[in-house]
Amino acid sequence: MAHVLVIEDDDVIRPRLVRSLRDLGHAVDSSPAGLPGLQVALDARPDLVVLDLGLPDVDGMQVLTMLRAVSQVPVIIASARDDDPGLVRALDAGADDYLVKPFTAAQLEARIRAVIRRSGRPVEQAEVAVGALRIDLRGRRVTLDDTEVELSPREFDLLAYLAQRPGEVVTKRELLTEVWLQPWGGSDKTVDVHLSWLRRKLGETASEPRHLTTVRGVGVRLSAPDAP
Ligand code: CA
């Protein structure tokens, strides 16, 4: 089961795809155009995007390029242009796989499984535990030593992102790109401020870290207190 976003303008194909994917147990969002679809991809953070190349507002290739600037979400291109060099360009631009229309739901399902397996994203993962922290990714709730911690949406996103990379130092630039979706702009200060709020809510400080450790000049790491 995965959370799939379908960006497809064809009013016959789109509802059919949505229905078959739901029947297979996936959670499905859909959009009939490129820019609104891109917005859904950024807001809803699907596990995978099925992207049509021929869209009414912007070309699917442009959608792919814009999406790739801010996200590594797996993308399967659904294209009618079987002999179009567009498919090659799409793969070069970061698409993970493609299907040429018409295709069956079973064919799409097989590609979805393969792409998700290759991307190594733990889509079934609903909860992450790091030390005394438990982060419910679907329910967006956090407990520390079994006590609920109230976080703002942004603080939650920040913590959830770090929790999925436990023990790894994550740079502020990466956080601006992945959590704030500002790959080009944004300031380290933004990250610093949210980190300090998050720290306070987790009952720790920069000088006396428990789970959240700043690595000077590099970034920040979330790890179990007793981890090396
Ligand atoms: Ca189309």
Image: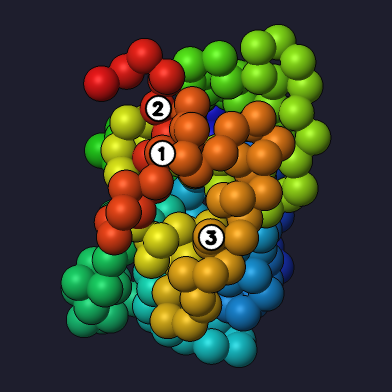
Residue at point 60%, 86% (across, down): 56
Residue 151 visible at all: yes
The first of marks 2 and 1 along the sequence is 1
Quarter of the image for the N terminus: give it: top right
Label 3: element kind: helix
Q: Which mark is residue 26?
A: none
Label 1: element kind: strand
Above or below 147: residue 212: below
**Disc 3 residue type (three-letter):** Asp
Q: CA distance from mark 2 to mark 1?
A: 8 Å
Label 2: element kind: loop
> Where in the figure is residue 54, as x and y percent of width and height?
48, 80
Which image quadrant for residue 119?
A: top left
196 or 167, nearer to the observer: 196
Residue at point 30%, 38% (across, down): 168
Above or below 113: residue 86: below
**Disc 2 residue type (three-letter):** Ser
Viewed as shown, does residue 99 lie left or right of 93?
Answer: right
